[in-house]
Image (tube, rainbow, N blue to C red):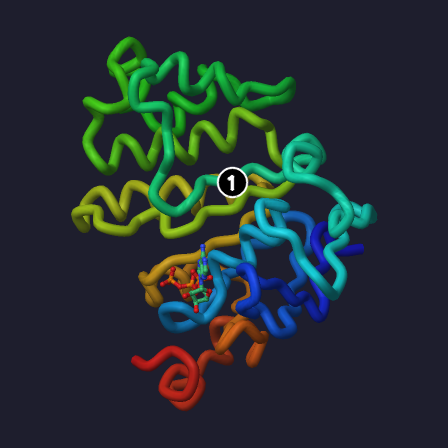
Amino acid sequence: MSLLQVSKLEAFYGASQALFGVDLEIAEGELVALMGRNGMGKTTTVRAITRMLRTTRGEISFDGRDLSVLPSFRAARLGIGLAPEGRRCFANLSVNENLMASARPGPWDIGKVTELFPRLGERMDQSAATLSGGEQQMLAISRALMTNPRLLILDEATEGLAPVVRQEIWAAIARLKQGGQSILVIDKGFSELRAVADRCVILARGETVWTGTPAGLTREVETEFLGV
Ligand code: ATP
């Protein structure tokens, strides 16, 4: 059974329709890349899954439960951890306070996240506002992990970071996958995504237009849907 099954999902921002039929499936332990050009509905899909945005049609089944009827705080409790686009840590709180604010019982704790990101361990008492962009991103991922999610969602986790820091984040993502974590990733680093993804789902104009393995992402598919 899949952990997450999204089918024919539709959603609006006010009167303007943003999703027209998104299909997306994630099996337990799988890493799925959600791809597509700018503005095609990737972040909106994440908002719909995490119930930040109400959906009008379609199904979201998570761990066998229908999420389409739940408000967002319940979705988080069911086990979806999101590191959102733009990071959104509490700027005035320390690293430690940021982590503790999202902690829920489970194997992930401060010790485990600082093992994954040793740099955070050295900055526990520093306010989040004083971290570098890469460290803030590590904190955002760690905050999501501290919720002990069944599904981790990373929306643009390497955006705007220096290549060497991006590599650190990708290495952490690979480690999480090796540990059996189910992950949905949105990122502009196609080659890194291809290397780590089990499957890729491509959106165009708010609709799923292609699903397959990274090996199936031919030049033709990339040209048609990703513009590379
Ligand atoms: P990007 O890579 O640029 O973030 P995306 O694939 O994540 O792109 P979305 O951010 O989901 O795309 O946007 C999908 C569509 O919904 C776009 O047409 C966008 O303009 C619109 N949209 C996104 N957020 C809002 C909002 N808060 N209010 C109204 N329209 C929005």
Q: Quadrant of ligand 1?
A: bottom left
Residue at x-position 29% and y-position 32%: 136
Q: Is residue 149 at all visible to an observer of this figure?
A: yes
Q: Which quarter of the figure has residue 147?
A: top right
Foreground of the two, 29 or 6: 6
From this viewpoint, which residue is outermost toward the front? 15
Foreground of the two, 155 or 69: 69
- Residue 78 in the image: state x and y as whole percent: 71, 35
Q: Is residue 211 at all visible to an observer of this figure?
A: no
- Residue 194 in the image: state x and y as whole percent: 42, 66
Residue at x-position 81% and y-position 46%: 65
User: Is 194 on the left-hand or right-hand side of 151?
Assistant: left
Residue that numbered label 1 is attached to: 82
User: Is 203 on the left-hand or right-hand side of 94?
Assistant: right
Could you tell me the amino acid type at mark 1? Leu
Is 97 drawn above or below residue 42 in the view shown?
above
